[in-house]
Image: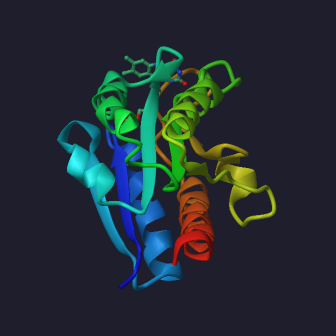
Amino acid sequence: MGLQVLIAFHSDYGSTQKMAQAIAAGISAAAPSASVSLKQAVDTTLDDLTGADVIVFGTPVHMGSMAWQMKQLIDRGSKLWMENALEGRVGGVFVSGSGFGGAGGGAELTMAALHANFLEHGMVVVGFPKTLSGYAHGGIHWGPYARTGNHEGMPEGISDAQLAACRSYGAHVIGIAERLLA
Ligand SMILES: Cc1cc2nc3c(=O)[nH]c(=O)nc-3n(C[C@H](O)[C@H](O)[C@H](O)COP(=O)(O)O)c2cc1C
């Protein structure tokens, strides 16, 4: 049986959801035996978390940090921290933001906060090496990042190049997980 992958994300307007779907496609293309489940953070249960070998979290940046819906899932997961239930699982993260001002608008802070949660659980965090395809258009070393706003701060949506970076990251995460866990 292949690895169980959970992609838990929050998305209000669809950009982060498209990233989640592209990461899932990258995982499935690279590892057809993997079972991939996509869930909005508010619908994600603790059983979903404990049932996954690989957990990928994604969120839009909201006021320089993660959306509250993702933080709520993380805080619900503190029960699993008490039980050491996620130790040794593999984790990955992705983020979208309008990026007004050109400096990412809190994307890296948000990704680091998601990583911090995985590391608290004793999980193994997978970044996004710059040698992978798509990195130049949709990557930072923490994971895929999609800037969805234009230079005037208006929503522009998500580009094919950013989604390609997500697919590339999905393939990378499952490849690392297979080497560690399969
Ligand atoms: C309440 C709120 C706060 C936001 N704060 C930020 C921010 O601090 N930095 C940023 O880059 N984008 C910020 N944005 C823009 C969103 O992160 C961006 O539009 C994102 O791509 C939306 O993802 P979604 O389509 O999955 O909901 C904010 C959006 C909302 C609704």
Q: Work out whether 53 lies above or below 128.
A: below
- In the image, 119 versus 152, the foreground residue is 119
> In this view of the protein, can residue 12 be seen by the observer?
no
Q: Is residue 158 left or right of residue 165?
A: left
* Number of numbered markers: 0
- In the image, 78 versus 135, the foreground residue is 78
| Residue 89 location (% of width, % of height) | 49, 56
At a point 41% along the width and 43% down the height, the residue shown is 84
- The colour scheme used here is rainbow
At a point 66% along the width and 43% down the height, the residue shown is 142
Q: Residue furthest right?
A: 131
At a point 48% along the width and 39% down the height, the residue shown is 121
| Residue 117 location (% of width, % of height) | 50, 33
> In this view of the protein, can residue 132 be seen by the observer?
yes
| Residue 136 location (% of width, % of height) | 75, 53
- In the image, 6 versus 11, the foreground residue is 6
| Residue 131 location (% of width, % of height) | 81, 63
State which quarter of the image contains the N terminus: bottom left
Q: Work out whether 46 lies above or below 52.
A: above
